[in-house]
Structures are given as structure tokens and as C-alpha cells.
Amino acid sequence: MGQYIIEGGNRLNGQVRVQGAKNSALPILAAAVAVGKPCLIHNCPDLSDIDATIKILRSLGCRVVKNGDMVSVDSTGLTSNVISECLMREMRSSIIFMGALISRTGEAEITAPGGCDIGLRPFDLHLSAMKKLGVNVSEKRGKIRCTCKRVRGGRITLSFPSVGATENIILASVRAAGTTVIINAAREPEIADLAYFLNSCGARISGAGESVITVEGVDALHSSQYAIMPDRIAACTYMAAAAITGSSIIADGVVLSHLAPVAGCFEQMGCRIESSGNKLRLTAPERLKSPETVRTMPYPGFPTDCQAIIMSTVSVAQGTTIVCENIFENRFKHVAELNRMGTDIKVHDKIAVINGVKSLQGTAVNATDLRAGAALVLAGLCAEGTTYVRDIHYIDRGYDSFAENLTALGAVIKRKD
Ligand code: EPZ
């Protein structure tokens, strides 16, 4: 379903404006259901996952108008708290509507969500947290029904700092009777962005971005306008495009602190990183060196969403790199595709060993998930000859104007639907 045709070997230069964060925009749009008043979201990226979220909002009776990077959501006239299996299956973050609907109506009927096939993607932590907030949860023939008179605040310790579970707990408890404390909460910047948005609507959330978050329930929330933070994973992707092609580019509109975990890795590869304000310049060396072992960890550790992107980059570095994927159990599907291009990567359980090679050869490869697809495009940018990256609908889920941005930087990449 659509492919990118890439002529490799071109140096990049210039500046790219980094899109709004997908994993911030998705929960914030769902949160508009909990707010119950008109909200205007700015800097929203143009992605198929955003379109899927808008479809869910409209199926619930919300009025949604998308105008460029602005999305207005008016959930005043909510008419339903049921989300169809078809809509739930379109992406992972459909699960976040559970907390928002419970907050607003006391009820939600959903099914298991979809999402990239990078592991089982269970949501047991989400459901057990809802129960601790006084929500009755029943599962029958694939449908999950949540009901409660009014959410009561509680103390929830997460066995894993799950991003989605943290978001669902915040959304379910924002209008609860009493206070909720989340212990071992996810610390990803997207959690803080969600909390900043909800606080701009009158919520009382503190500690977001730290491992203990406190949500003091309020009776009602009010309208707000909010600008989504920059996408740190997209920023890393463009930095990697410069690194793998021996180029120097500027990523504009970034939050430098969000990039700290990956910036260190690029510097170990011999890249120079200069920053001023919200601009970051990455200048690659003639040939990359292999960095220290890359271990994916919850934030502020190395982000799992950058694992495939970095693996592509180090595949042509001098030396051997070890990558350890600690978050998802099936997130190495890009390896087989990269090896078709001449990389030398072996996988042993959650460890990948990448022996850097001098060059890659263009060929036909298949995107298997969102970030794997981006990693294959990066490999195509430096490969000899032409690379055909197929199934690029995965990439459309998370990258806004990907080919246009790379073309503006000097890449030769065409989309063929
Ligand atoms: C979010 O997924 C992101 N998606 C993912 O980005 C990201 O990789 C992930 O967080 C980790 O940072 C969105 O925000 C839409 P988790 P999420 O719950 O919430 C296990 C991308 O490419 N777990 O933190 O699903 C789970 O299996 C996507 O943009 C449970 O066991 O991630 C995984 O091993 C991919 N039970 C680990 O926790 C649960 O109830 C992390 O999952 C929930 C999660």
C-alpha cells in the first residue's frame, strides 16, 4: 500500500521544522472528551493516527474541525460512550478514550486496541488501575464495559511505568471525587504535555514528568487552547538522516532536554551537536563510529521508538554496536529487511549485534511498523542505487510530510501510491 522510491548517496543540508508530537496529540485530543467544552489544539501533526482519533471523536458525537495544524474539538454534545471494534483496532492510543469517557460519563465500552505489531501490547495495567479507582470492569466476547457512579481517587502503584496506563489514570481521575496518586508513573515528556493541557482546562495535576503524579479531582473543566510540544522521535529521525548521510542539518522547533538520551548516542558516533534556542544542528563525521551499547529504557533512558532508527544509523558505522530492546518483545522486525540491504545484524532474543559495513545496497524492502519503516528510509538515503520501501502506510501513522521534508533537505525520495 504505497511505497517510497529513494535514490541513495545524496548529502543533506538545510533546516527542517519538526512536527508536533504524535504521542502527545493523540492523548490530548482524547482528553477533550473529558473536558466537555470546546478546545482548540495547535501544532497538531497531519498523521493517519490523528485522522483515526478524529473518527473516534466524531463517532462519540463530538464536533471536530481540522484546519491545517489546528484541530478544534467540541465534545459538549457527546452522544455515546461506545467505541466500535473497527475504530479501536486502528491504533494503540484508542485505549486512552477509556479514561476520558469514564471521567466524562462514568461509562465506556471499548475493545482491545490496535497499534504497531511490536509485541503483545497488553493493557492489564490500564484495567487494574480503573478498578482501583472504583470502576466496574467486565469483559465479555471481546467487549470491555466500564461503569461507575463517580470515580473515586485512589493510590495506584504501576508495576511498569506504562505511558498509556499513566495517561488513562490521569484522564479517569481528573474529575474524580478525591485525589489520586500514581506511583512509578511514566516520565515521558508526553505525559507532562497532557497534564499541562488538562491544567490549562482547570485540572489540578502535579508531578507530571516525575515518577509520582498527584491528580486532585475537580468538578468541572473549561475550554482551552493548547499547542502540542515538538515530536522528539521525529527530531531524532531527521538527526539520524544527517548522521547516516554524512551531512549537517538543523532541526528547528525542538526541546533540547527531550533529546538528551539520543544526543549522547549521536555524539558517541562522532557527530557534533550544536544548539541555540529551539534549534539543534547535527554535523556528521566522514564515517560514524559505533557507540556504546544502546539499551532502550523508560524515559529519561534511551527511547524504544528510536531503536530502529539508531540501528539503521550504526549499520554503516565503524565497529560493532550492541542494541538491547528492553521495552517491547517483538521490536526487531526491521532487522531482516535491513539485512536485505547488506547490513550485518544478528539477533539473539532481546539483543541485536550490528557489525558496521562500509556501504548498503538499494533494493525492495517492506515496512513492518512505523519506526521500522522510518529506519528503512534512512538506510535508503545512504544506500547505493535505488531503494523501494513498501507498505508506507505504517510511516504515515507517525510522520507528517516525511518525503517532503527529506526532499527539502536534499534527499531524492518520491512517494508512489
Ligand atoms: C506508548 O505506547 C507509545 N505510543 C509508543 O510509541 C512507545 O513506544 C511506548 O509508549 C513506550 O514509550 C503512544 O503513545 C500512542 P507502554 P504504550 O504502555 O502506551 C507493557 C510509536 O512508535 N505494558 O509504555 O502502549 C507493554 O507491553 C509508538 O510512536 C503491559 O505489560 O507503551 C510494553 O512492553 C510505538 N501492560 C511496555 O509495558 C499494560 O497494561 C511499555 O508499554 C501496558 C503496557
Image (cartoon, rainbow, N blue to C red):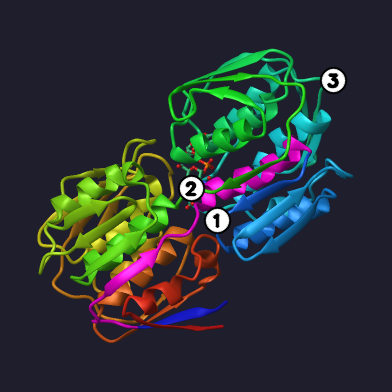
Q: Which residue is mark 2?
A: 229
Q: Which residues are magenta?
A: 7-36
Asked whether residue 85 is in view, the answer is: no
In this rendering, position of residue 156 left or right of residue 211: right
Q: Which residue is mark 3?
A: 149
In this rendering, position of residue 93 left or right of residue 281: right
In this rendering, position of residue 332 left or right of residue 158: left
Do residues under tags 2 and 1 come within 8 Å of each other at their CB atoms? yes
Q: Name the spot of residue 43 as percent of width and height, x first.
A: 55, 56
Q: Which residue is mark 1?
A: 43
In the rendered image, the vertical position of residue 203 relative to residue 239, given as above or below: above
Gap in Å between the C-alphas at discs 3 and 2? 34 Å
Using the image as rendered, state which of residue 320 and residue 37 is in the foreground: 37
Gap in Å between the C-alphas at discs 3 and 1? 36 Å
> How many marks on residues?
3
Please tell me which residue is depicted at 16% across the width and 58% down the height of the picture: 271
Alpha-carbon neighbours of circle 2 within 10 Å: few (<14), some, or many (≥20)? Answer: many
